[in-house]
């Protein structure tokens, strides 16, 4: 397993069409990133896997997709207007701003100028709804998807009458005006969160908290095949905890820029439902069949999709001599199979390879046609984008001898008869 620098990952991601800097032709916009054709596939595969494990395969978790713009009273009640801040310092000379906890020493990291006293900077983006731009039309872009879950707690209860414990999950965009977006997609201003709030009786807090910690760890290790040695637990001290959390454990991953937060499990107690009951005047409570009425407590599982993608890219990156390959688990690889004719100037080979490609594409839709350059170059390209299998149609294939299938990780090639190819590939991809 090779260690990879951030520069190498950023360069590969751009070169091969995973992730591009946002608004690049205009000089970019700090903290924004665009997913290219391969990035979109990887992103969808990972979020679909998370959704399957968190929602589809379970009976007790419901999905929602709430609006990004919410009534500003939501953010007052949730504590984000007053408490969602980072300490910021400004250089008196060059006017650059930094997060206080990112600066070492007393001087500006850019020009060594004198820094101002720290002040609290609210990270929520503001905008206006409607045509009038005054404080009465001010709304925020949500800084976490969780609040769209709490505001739909009563709706889901009314529609489905679930019994406790149950959860509500959501995948969606979140926005934070980070003082210093940095480290590629690790700290962005616009990113996707995958969040689940599990509503419980307070007596089961400890046990459910442990269950969701385990869930996160197992998802990374078993479902994404991330190397366990690169993961570690970090328990938040009281000072580190967000304003809503009574306990918080992060899974740290060894990113190229160090071991940092990837996935959080939080005990949010009854903070949110109580605050929204107060803020909205709508009672957000649960009634047991024997008449007990209480505000459920919440255990939250929250992870950034971008950070998960960065972890997956970091973990999958391998380099030996001049070969680079991404050893994605086949289920999340953007393309599963690439098909090539051995030579692209031999019409009979191209025709046969097209036939093979068309037939594979019917049962493995994420199959790619590649006839650029020579076979060696094609292998290198497919290795770099993490395609698990390359199928080459050569002259022997024209004689009915089958095609060669090359394995990305072992680089071994096997000849497989066309009539066995479907079963062969499906077994390998599911194995
Ligand atoms: N609802 C709880 C919550 O938002 P958080 O620890 O602030 O908690 C949860 O964020 C996760 O969202 C983090 O563990 C991280 O994966 C991701 N995340 C947070 N800020 C981010 C940013 N600026 N860029 C990318 N991902 C971010």
Image: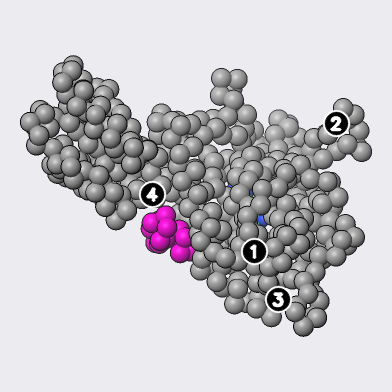
Residue matched to label 1: 167
Percent x, y of residue 162:
68, 68
Q: Is mark 4 within 8 Å of ligand 1?
A: no
CA–CA distance in space, label 1 to label 2: 34 Å
Among numbered discs 1 and 3, the one appearing first in the sequence: 1
Residue 226 lies in the magenta stretch: yes
Tag 3 and tag 4, C-beta contact below 8 Å:
no
Among numbered discs 3 and 2, the one appearing first in the sequence: 2
Q: Secondary structure at mark 3?
A: loop
Left or right side of 352 for 296 = right
Q: Is mark 3 within 8 Å of ligand 1?
A: no
**Can residue 269 be seen?**
no
CA–CA distance in space, label 4 to label 2: 44 Å
The front one of 343 and 101 is 343
Percent x, y of residue 71:
83, 46
- Residue in the picture at 72% in, 43% down: 68
Task: Examine the rendered structure and indicate whether residue 198 appears above or below residue 90.
Answer: below
Percent x, y of residue 29:
62, 29
- Residue in the picture at 30% in, 29% down: 369
CA–CA distance in space, label 1 to label 4: 26 Å
Range of magenta residues: 217-233
Q: Secondary structure at mark 1?
A: strand
Question: Which color mode does the image show?
Answer: one colour
Residue matched to label 4: 331
Among numbered discs 1 and 2, the one appearing first in the sequence: 2
Q: Secondary structure at mark 2?
A: loop
CA–CA distance in space, label 3 to label 2: 41 Å
Residue matched to label 2: 130
CA–CA distance in space, label 3 to label 4: 36 Å
């Amino acid at each position: 397993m090779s260690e990879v620098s951030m520069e190498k990952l950023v360069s590969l991601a751009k070169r091969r069409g995973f992730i591009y800097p946002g608004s690049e032709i205009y000089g970019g916009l700090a903290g924004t990133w665009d997913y290219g054709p391969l990035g979109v596939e990887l992103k969808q595969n990972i979020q679909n896997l998370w959704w399957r494990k968190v929602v589809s395969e379970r009976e007790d978790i419901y999905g929602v997709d709430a609006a990004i713009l919410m009534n500003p009273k939501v953010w007052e009640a949730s504590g984000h207007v007053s408490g969602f801040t980072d300490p910021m310092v400004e250089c008196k000379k060059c006017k650059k701003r930094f997060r206080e906890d990112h600066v070492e020493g007393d001087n500006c990291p850019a020009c060594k100028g004198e820094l101002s006293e720290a002040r609290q900077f609210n990270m929520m983006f503001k905008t206006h709804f409607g045509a009038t731009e005054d404080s009465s039309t001010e709304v925020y872009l949500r800084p976490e998807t969780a609040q769209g879950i709490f505001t739909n707690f009563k709706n889901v209860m009314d529609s489905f009458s679930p019994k406790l414990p149950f959860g509500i999950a959501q995948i969606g965009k979140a926005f934070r005006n980070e003082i210093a977006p940095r480290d590629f997609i690790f700290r962005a201003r616009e990113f996707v969160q995958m969040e689940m709030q599990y509503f419980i009786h307070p007596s089961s807090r400890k046990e459910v908290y442990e269950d969701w910690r385990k869930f996160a760890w197992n998802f990374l290790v078993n479902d994404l095949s991330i190397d366990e040695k690169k993961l570690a637990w970090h328990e938040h001290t009281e000072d580190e905890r967000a304003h809503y959390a009574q306990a918080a454990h992060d899974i740290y991953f060894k990113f190229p820029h160090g071991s940092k937060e990837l996935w959080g499990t939080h005990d949010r107690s009854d903070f949110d439902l109580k605050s929204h009951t107060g803020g909205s005047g709508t009672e957000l409570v649960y009634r047991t069949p024997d008449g007990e009425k209480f505000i459920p407590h919440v255990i939250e599982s929250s992870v950034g999709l971008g950070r998960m993608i960065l972890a997956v890219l970091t973990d999958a990156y391998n380099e030996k001599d001049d070969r680079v390959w991404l050893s994605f688990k086949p289920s999340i690889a953007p393309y599963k199979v690439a098909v090539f004719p051995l030579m692209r100037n031999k019409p009979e080979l191209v025709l046969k390879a097209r036939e093979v490609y068309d037939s594979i594409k019917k049962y493995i839709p994420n199959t790619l046609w590649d006839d650029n350059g020579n076979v060696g170059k094609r292998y290198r390209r497919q290795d770099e984008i993490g395609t698990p299998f390359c199928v080459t149609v050569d002259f022997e294939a024209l004689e009915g001898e089958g095609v060669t299938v090359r394995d990305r990780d072992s680089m071994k090639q096997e000849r497989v008869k066309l009539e066995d190819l479907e079963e062969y590939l499906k077994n390998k991809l599911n194995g």
